[in-house]
Image: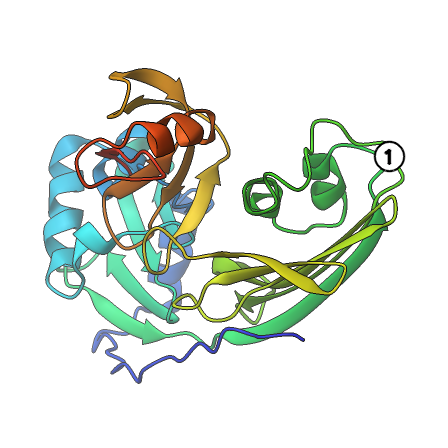
């Protein structure tokens, strides 16, 4: 059983410049502009932090933010979106061009060689289904990277199969099969977060199968054909960011190793502490029973 996420893109008006450069002007601009840089947004990124790290001056960062804000809410900047920019060769702190590619295929383009105004260009987004089957003879991260598969699936599988499989204690003979979908540009660039549809792990005599649907639907885990677990996402549309990490637990009022999730749609992270799950069952605090939760800063 395979459930695939259905993604849709809305129509966006395309605006173009009324000024056409002459061949001489184009040649001069090409020589003066450095090659394009690219950054895929990760949790915690902001437009200002990305451009600041790239050495862009504060006045231009402010101009860029104001221009983009006319057509896009920068508070919704989320993992998987792609920021591209070029600078002038003789002054790397000066932007020549900046674009933000959103997950629905809208490219927001700023040209700093002209009066600054955001242009919206609709880029074709293709949905590609992928599958991989392999023997896990290395770490899961390494195995995924070697097959150009999303390394984030290593975190997802370790968290969703917690209590069934300890990925730190594998024999190197486990067989894994994955199916997922991803959005790509015509040049093959992956845009946004890939959506895991199905995972199968064969360990000794057991077969574990994980089935997922759309981002609003839960993860369902089967062991040898029988359902053993159903896990709802902590935040709609979120993906697990880490299997562990320190966070305050409300039950014991101290930092403990936790599992977390970061939503690409906002700044909330919810963390559940497997180490304290039993303690919270025995010592419920307030209305929180069975799982300790904490809210901390996430993506913005």
Looking at the rendered structure, the secondary structure element under dot 1 is loop
The spot of residue 207 in percent (x, y) is: 79, 55
Q: Nearer the viewer, residue 227 or 182?
A: 227
The spot of residue 14 in percent (x, y) is: 27, 80
Q: Nearer the viewer, residue 268 or 64?
A: 268
Q: Give the residue number, with chain letter if any, for mark 1.
A: 172
Classify residue 46 as left or right of residue 32.
Answer: left
Up-down relation of residue 156 to residue 167 (above or below): below
Up-down relation of residue 118 to residue 64 (above or below): below
User: Which quarter of the image is occupied by the N terminus?
Assistant: bottom right
Mark 1: few/some/many CA within 10 Å (<14, 14-19, 20+): few
Name the residue at 15% across, 48% down: 65
Up-down relation of residue 233 to residue 16 (above or below): above
The spot of residue 218 in percent (x, y) is: 46, 63
Q: Tell me which corner region of the image, top left, top right, bottom left or bottom right, holds residue 221.
A: bottom right
Q: Nearer the viewer, residue 142 or 108?
A: 142
Whether residue 37 can be seen here: no
Q: Tell me which corner region of the image, top left, top right, bottom left or bottom right, holds residue 10.
A: bottom left
Whether residue 109 can be seen here: yes
Name the residue at 35% across, 36% down: 271
The spot of residue 145 in percent (x, y) is: 70, 42
Classify residue 124 as left or right of residue 211.
Answer: left
Classify residue 7 as left or right of residue 210.
Answer: left
Name the residue at 50% across, 73% down: 5
- Please state the total of marks drawn on the protein image: 1
User: Which quarter of the image is occupied by the C terminus?
Assistant: top left
Name the residue at 23% across, 55% down: 76
């Amino acid at each position: 059983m395979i459930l695939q996420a259905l993604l849709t893109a809305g129509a966006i008006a395309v605006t173009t410049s009324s000024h056409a450069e002459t061949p001489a002007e184009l040649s001069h601009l090409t020589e003066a502009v450095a090659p394009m840089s690219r950054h895929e947004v990760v949790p915690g990124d902001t437009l200002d932090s990305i451009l600041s790290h790239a050495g862009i001056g504060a006045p231009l960062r402010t101009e860029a933010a104001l221009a983009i804000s006319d057509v896009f809410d920068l508070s919704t900047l989320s993992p998987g979106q792609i920021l591209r920019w070029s600078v002038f060769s003789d002054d790397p702190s000066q932007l020549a061009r900046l674009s933000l590619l959103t997950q629905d295929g809208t490219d927001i383009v700023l040209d700093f060689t002209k009066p600054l105004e955001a242009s919206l260009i609709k880029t074709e987004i293709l949905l590609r289904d992928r599958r991989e089957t392999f023997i896990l003879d290395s770490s899961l991260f390494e195995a995924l990277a070697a097959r150009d598969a999303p390394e984030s699936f290593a975190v997802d599988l370790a968290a969703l199969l917690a209590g069934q499989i300890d990925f730190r204690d594998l024999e190197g003979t486990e067989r894994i099969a994955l199916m997922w979908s991803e959005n790509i540009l015509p040049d093959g660039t992956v845009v946004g977060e890939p959506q895991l549809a199905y995972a199968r792990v064969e360990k000794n005599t057991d077969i574990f199968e994980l089935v997922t649907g759309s981002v609003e639907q839960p993860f369902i885990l089967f062991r040898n054909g029988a359902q053993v677990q159903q896990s709802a996402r902590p935040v709609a549309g979120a993906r697990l960011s880490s299997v562990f990490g320190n966070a305050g637990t409300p039950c014991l009022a101290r930092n403990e190793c936790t599992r977390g999730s970061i939503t690409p749609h906002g700044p909330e992270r919810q963390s559940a502490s497997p180490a304290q799950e039993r303690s919270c069952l025995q010592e419920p605090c307030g209305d929180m029973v069975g799982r300790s939760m904490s809210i901390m800063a996430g993506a913005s």
